[in-house]
C-alpha cells in the first residue's frame, strides 16, 4: 500500500477506533480481547481498503468487518459471566467464599472508561454512550446467542437501520426483525427492570464511592451501612458464591475481607460508565500490591451492586502502578 493511500486510510478510519473498541467489548465482554479484535478488524480493513470504493459508508463498512471478526472469535469460546450468572445467591453466610478452579469459568472483565474517552483536544470526536457499557447490560448481552447479541447491539445501541443491520450481517431484514424480538425478550427475562444509575460525575455517586473506599481503608464495616442499599448485592470473581442483601454483604466483608486498618488502599477511577476503584491489598511481607478493580452501581438511594474483579493485572490495565505511590 502506498504511503498516500495509507495516510488516507488512517484519516478515514482512525476516528472510529474508540466506538469500535466499545462495540467489540459489548460483543465479547473482555477489554483485552476487544482490543485484539479491533486490531484484527483494522488489519482486515487495510487489506481490503483498495476495493472498498465507497459502496457503503466508512462507518458501516468498518462495523461489518468488526462484527464478523467478533462472531468468528466467539464461536469456540465459552461466554463470559459474573458469579450471579452461574447460580443464585449464597445461602450459607457463615462459610468463606471459595474460588472457582482456574480455567473452569470465563469471567467478564471491566472496561476502563479512559479507553473510550475522546481526546480533550478533539471536540468533534465521537462520544461513546457510557450507559450502553454498564456492567449489568454487558453481563446480560453475554447470555444471548452471538448473532442475536450482534443484532441487538447494532439496532438498539448503535441505531443502524434494519436494512443496514441485514447488510452488515449478510442476512434478510426478516431475520433481523425476528432476531431482535427474541433478543429483547431474553434480555427482559435476565434484567426486567434496568436500574437508573447515577453518572460517575454526580456528587452523590462520588460520595458513595468515597464511603466505600473509606470503609475498606479504615476496616470499618459500619460505614458500609451508609453506602449500601438494603437490597444490595455483592459478588467477586473468581468466587462462585455471591451475597444478596446489605446485612449478608456486610457480614461477609466484615468476617472474611476487611481485615485491619491499612490492609487496603483504593484509588478512584471509572469503569463501564460507573464509579470504580483500583484496589491494593497488603501482602504477607507487609507491602501493598495490586489486587484488582471494584465497580459500584450507584443509585439515588445507595449502592445497589458491588462487583469486585480479583485480578491484579487489571490495575495496570487501568493505568495504575503495581505498587501505589506513598
Image (cartoon, rainbow, N blue to C red):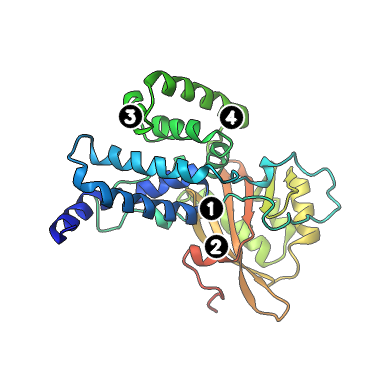
Seen as rendered, the residue at the extreme bottom is 285
Q: Any mark on residue 323, and which?
A: none
Q: Nearer the viewer, residue 178 or 275?
A: 178
Point out the residue furthest to the top here.
174
State left or right for residue 148 relative to residue 246.
left
> What is the quadrant of residue 36 in the picture?
bottom left
In this image, 234 relative to 169: left or right?
right
Q: Alpha-carbon distance for marks 3 and 2? A: 37 Å
Q: Nearer the viewer, residue 256 or 43?
A: 43
Residue that carries the numbered disc 4 in the rendered image: 193
Q: Which disc number belongs to residue 167? A: 3
Q: Earlier in the sequence, mark 3 or mark 2?
A: 3
The residues tagged by marks 1 and 4 sit, at their Cα atoms, a distance apart of 22 Å
The reply to whether the C-beta atoms of the residues labelled 2 and 1 are less than 8 Å apart is: yes
Instruction: Using a 10 Å C-alpha cutoff, classify the residue at mark 2 as few (fewer than 14 neighbours), some (14 to 19) or many (20 or more).
Output: many
Q: Quadrant of the C terminus?
A: bottom right
Q: Circle 2 — which element?
A: helix
Residue at the spot of label 1? 110
Query: Can you see residue 194?
Result: yes
Question: Which of marks 4 and 1 precedes in the sequence?
Answer: 1
Which of disc 1 and disc 2 is earlier in sequence?
1
Distance Cα–Cα, label 3 vs label 4: 32 Å
Amino acid at each position: 500500500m502506498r504511503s498516500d493511500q495509507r495516510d488516507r486510510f488512517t484519516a478515514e478510519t482512525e476516528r472510529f477506533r474508540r466506538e469500535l473498541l466499545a462495540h467489540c467489548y459489548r460483543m465479547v465482554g473482555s477489554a483485552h480481547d476487544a482490543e485484539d479484535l479491533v486490531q484484527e478488524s483494522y488489519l482486515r480493513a487495510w487489506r481490503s481498503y483498495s476495493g472498498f470504493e465507497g459502496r457503503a459508508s466508512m462507518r458501516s463498512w468498518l462495523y461489518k468487518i468488526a462484527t464478523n471478526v467478533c462472531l468468528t472469535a466467539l464461536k469456540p469460546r465459552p461466554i463470559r459471566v459474573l458469579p450471579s450468572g452461574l447460580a443464585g445467591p449464597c445461602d450459607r453466610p457463615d462459610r468463606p467464599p471459595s474460588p472457582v478452579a482456574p480455567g473452569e469459568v470465563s469471567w467478564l472483565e471491566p472496561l476502563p472508561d479512559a479507553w473510550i474517552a475522546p481526546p480533550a483536544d478533539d471536540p468533534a470526536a465521537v462520544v461513546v454512550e457510557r450507559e450502553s457499557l454498564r456492567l449489568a447490560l454487558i453481563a446480560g448481552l453475554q447470555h444471548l446467542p452471538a448473532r442475536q447479541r450482534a443484532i441487538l447491539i447494532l439496532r438498539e445501541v448503535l441505531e443502524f437501520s434494519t436494512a443496514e443491520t441485514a447488510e452488515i450481517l449478510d442476512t434478510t431484514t426478516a431475520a433481523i426483525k425476528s432476531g431482535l424480538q427474541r433478543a429483547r425478550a431474553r434480555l427482559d427475562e435476565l434484567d426486567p427492570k434496568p436500574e437508573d444509575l447515577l453518572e460517575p460525575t454526580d456528587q452523590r455517586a462520588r460520595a458513595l464511592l468515597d464511603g466505600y473506599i473509606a470503609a475498606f481503608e479504615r476496616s470499618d464495616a459500619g460505614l458500609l451501612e451508609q453506602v449500601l442499599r438494603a437490597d444490595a448485592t455483592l459478588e467477586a470473581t473468581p468466587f462462585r458464591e455471591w451475597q444478596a442483601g446489605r446485612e449478608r454483604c456486610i457480614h461477609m466483608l466484615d468476617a472474611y475481607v476487611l481485615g485491619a486498618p491499612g490492609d487496603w488502599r483504593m484509588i478512584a477511577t471509572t469503569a463501564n460508565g460507573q464509579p470504580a476503584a483500583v484496589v491494593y491489598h497488603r501482602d504477607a511481607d507487609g507491602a501493598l500490591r495490586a489486587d484488582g478493580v471494584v465497580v459500584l452501581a450507584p443509585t439515588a438511594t445507595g449502592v445497589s451492586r458491588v462487583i469486585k474483579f480479583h485480578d491484579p493485572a487489571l490495575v495496570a490495565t487501568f493505568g495504575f502502578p503495581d505498587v501505589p505511590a506513598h
